Image (cartoon, coloured by chain):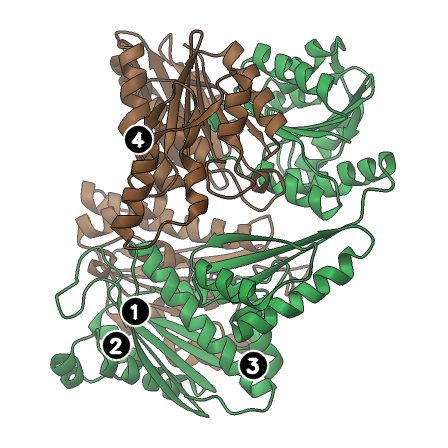
Chain colours: A green, B brown
Amino acid sequence: MKIAILTIGDELLNGDLADTNTAAIAKTLMDNALPVHEAATVGDLEGDISAALLRLAKTHDVVIATGGLGPTEDDRTSRAAARAFERPLSLNTKALEQIRARFRAWQRDMHPRNEKQALLPGRSVVICNEQGTAPGFHLKNNQTDLYFLPGVPTEMLAMLGGYVIPSLLERFPDPPSLCQRAVTVFGLAEPDVETRITRNGLPEGVELAFNVEVPIVQVKLRARGEHAQRLVDRAEMAVRQALDDHVVGIDGATLAGVTARLLSAAGITLALAESCTGGLIAKLLTDQPGSSAFLERSVVSYANSAKRDALHVTQELLDRHGAVSAECAEAMARGIYQAARTDIGLAVTGIAGPDGGSADKPVGTVYLAMTSRWGARNERFNFFGNRDQVRLRTACTALDWLRRMAMARLSGTEQDS
Amino acid sequence: MKIAILTIGDELLNGDLADTNTAAIAKTLMDNALPVHEAATVGDLEGDISAALLRLAKTHDVVIATGGLGPTEDDRTSRAAARAFERPLSLNTKALEQIRARFRAWQRDMHPRNEKQALLPGRSVVICNEQGTAPGFHLKNNQTDLYFLPGVPTEMLAMLGGYVIPSLLERFPDPPSLCQRAVTVFGLAEPDVETRITRNGLPEGVELAFNVEVPIVQVKLRARGEHAQRLVDRAEMAVRQALDDHVVGIDGATLAGVTARLLSAAGITLALAESCTGGLIAKLLTDQPGSSAFLERSVVSYANSAKRDALHVTQELLDRHGAVSAECAEAMARGIYQAARTDIGLAVTGIAGPDGGSADKPVGTVYLAMTSRWGARNERFNFFGNRDQVRLRTACTALDWLRRMAMARLSGTEQDS
C-alpha cells in the first residue's frame, strides 16, 4: 500500500505559507496505521498539477490532494484532474446543493462565483464539506484512489476523518498493527530527556523519536506487530519513570489543557496578575473550554498605575525595588489574591525585550510569585530567546507551577514551596 | 530556470514534524527573484531518496535537498546521492576538518560516529556548516546543480544564504526583475475582496493571489520585468481604492502590529475588559514591543465577582440582563474606562462555546463596547466557527475598532460611532 500526498498552491512555493497539511494528514493516517510514502507540492499552474497527479497516480495506490478548490480564478485543481484523467468537468448537483446549504446555514447570499466549485470531473463522488464552501471529491483511476480536499486545514481534516479514512480502511481492512504514543514533557531540554530515557532503557522493538517545540519536548514511542500496544504501554511506563513529574501527559496533552483540567478537578480557584506576559497565561488557560470554573480574573497590569490601583502595590515599593523585582511580583500576587479572594493568586513581572534590559536585569529576567491558601512561592528566572520565546517560557513555567500545585492538592500531599 | 526543493526524513511523512524548511527556502529564493517550481518529500529509505534525486535532477536546473546528513544510521542522503549519480563515497578531508573544528569550538570530544558525516560523493564541493556538525555539499550532474544541506533550520538557512544563493546568482546573474507585495485586509471575506478588486481592475501584467488565514485575507500582488516595481505600486493603489479602510497594511503588516503602532503614534491610552476572549486581545497587543506605551491594563473578568469588583458592574444589571448582554458590555467598558482613567475603555463579553449557548444567544454571540473621550460604541455580533475561531474573530474585530479610532484621531476626523 503506497500513499502519496499532494499539496497545491503558489503560496506554498513562494514562501508565503508553510505547509502544515502534509504533517496533519500524515499524522491522521499514521494513527490508522496507514504510512505515507511520498509528499509533493506544486503551484497553481494547471499543467503542473495535471503532471503531478498523473505521476503520483501511476506510482501510488492512493493520492490525497489538498488545495485549489476555492471559488477564485487561481483555483484550478478540478480542471487539472479533469484533464489528467480525461473526465471533462460537469456541474455536480450534489456539490451545488452542499454549497447552497452552506450559505443558507450562514444566512448569507451565495456568490455566483461559488457555483464554479460545483464543477467536478465526471464520475466523481462528492466529499461533503460541512464547514466551508469547497466540496471535495473522490475519483478512481485504474487501481488508484484519488481524494481531493480543500486546503483550509480545519475543513480538510474534517473531511479526511469523515470520508477518506473510512474509505481507506474499507480498501485496506487489515493494516499492520501499529501503536504509537506521544508523551508531553516540560522542564527538561531535549538532550536531558534523551539521556534520562536511554539510561533507563526501553523495551526492545520500540522506536523512539523527539519533537521539540520549545519549551515543550514530545517523546514519540512507536511499535509494530502483534504486541505493539503492550510494548508501547511498557515504554510509556519506562519514560514516566525516567522523567518523573516532568511528564505533563500523553497523546496531545498540552500544558495548558492538563493544568486547566487539574485545577477544575481539584476545585481550585485562581486569579492572575500578568505584567510581561500581557495576558498570555490567561489566554492559554481560557483556550480551554470550562475555564470559567476556576479562573476568577486576570489583570494585565502593564502600567504602574494599574499595579497600584488594581493590585494595591504601593508607590513606595515600586520606587524602592522597581516594577521588575521579586518584591513587586510578591506584592502583585498578594494583591490579586486578596482582591479576588481565590485559592491562588499568581503574578509575573519581567523584561520580555527587546528593550528595557540592564546589566543587573537583562532581557529575559522574570520574577514569578504565587500566594495561596497553602503557602507562597517566589522565584527569579533568566530565560533566553526573543520576546515571544521569553513570554512563552514564562507562561509555561507559570502553568507548570499551577499544574504541580493542583496535582499536590489532588493527591493529598503538601506542595513544597 | 527551474528549481526544486527536496526535503528528506521519515519524521516529515509520519506526522511527527511539519516541514518548515520548504517555505523558508522558498521565501529566501523569492527574495532573490528565484522562483521554486516544485517541492517533494521522501522518507529515509536510500532507494526513495535516490529515485527522487534522479527524477528532480532530470527535470530541473537546480535541486536543493535538506535532511539526512546527520551522524546516525538513518541519515542516508550522501549514500543515496552517491548511488544516484554514480560517485562513490570517499572521505572528504575538508569536511572532516570542519566537523573537528565544530567539536573544538564546543569544547567537546568528537564522537567516532561523526566521522561518517565527512563521507561525501566524489567531486563534491563542501558547504561549510558553522553552527552544527553536518557539512553540506554541492555537486553538478550534467546541467543540474544539486545542493545538499542539513535539516536543522538555523544551520540550513545560514548555509543557504552563505553559499547556495551566491552560487545561484552566479549561475543566473540576471534573474528577471520581480516585485511582490502583500496587502493585509480585514473585515471582508475572500470572495468579496476578489469581486471588489476585479471590478476595479488591476494594471495589465500584475498577478493576483489570495492567502486566507481567517479572519485575515492577504492580497498578493506580483509583477515581473523592467517595470515590475511601478506596476505593483499602481496595483497597490488600485487595491487600496477598491478595499478602502479594510486595508490594514502591506508586507507582513498584522492587525495587532498596525493597531499598536497607530495607538502609540496617536498617543492614545487604552484599558481592556475581556470576558470571552480571556486575555487574547491583551496578548495580541502585548506581542508588540513598546505596547506598554498605550496599554494601561487589561482585566480578564471571567467571573461575575470580577465584573462587580474590578469593573463596578452592578449585581442588579447582571441579574436583569445577564453577563452576556449589550448592557453588561457597556457597563464593563465604562467601568474599566473610569478605573484606569485612559482615553479608551474597551470591553467584550460573549459565548465562545462549545457550551453556554441558548436559542436567544447561540454560541458565537458577542457584545463589543467601547467608551472613550470621543464617544461610545456598542455592537452585537454573531460569529461562526469553533471556540478558537470565535475568540479570534472577536479579538480581531476589537483590534479593528481600535485601529480605526486611532486612524481617525491621527487624521483629525471624528470617529463615527
Q: Which mark is nearer the camera, 3 or 2?
A: 3
Circle 1 sits in a helix, a strand or a loop, which is it? loop
Tell me which residue sits at (51%, 23%) in the image. Answer: B81
Q: CA distance from mark 3 to mark 1?
A: 26 Å
> What is the count of numbered marks?
4
Check the residue under mark 2 and report the chain it is in.
A
Q: CA distance from mark 2 to mark 4?
A: 59 Å
What residue type is disc 2 on? Answer: Lys
Q: Which mark is nearer the camera, 3 or 1?
A: 3
Which residue does the numbered mark 2 point to in the structure image?
Answer: A307
Label 2 with label 1: CB-CB less than 8 Å? yes
Check the residue under mark 1 and report the chain it is in.
A
Q: CA distance from mark 1 to mark 4?
A: 51 Å
Circle 2 sits in a helix, a strand or a loop, which is it? helix
Q: Dot 4, how many residues are within 10 Å of its Cα: few (below 14), some (14-19), or many (20+)?
A: some
Q: Is residue A299 left or right of residue A316?
A: right
Q: Which mark is residue A275?
A: 1
Same-chain status of marks 3 and 2? yes
Q: Nearer the viewer, residue B226 or A37?
A: A37
Q: Which mark is residue B94?
A: 4
Check the residue under mark 3 and report the chain it is in.
A
Circle 3 sits in a helix, a strand or a loop, which is it? helix
Query: Picture coordinates of residue A229 (x, y %)?
Result: 77, 59
Which residue does the numbered mark 3 point to in the structure image?
Answer: A407
What residue type is disc 4 on? Answer: Lys
Q: Dot 2, how many residues are within 10 Å of its Cα: few (below 14), some (14-19), or many (20+)?
A: many
Query: Picture coordinates of residue B10 (x, y %)?
Result: 59, 39
Q: Dot 1, how many residues are within 10 Å of its Cα: few (below 14), some (14-19), or many (20+)?
A: many
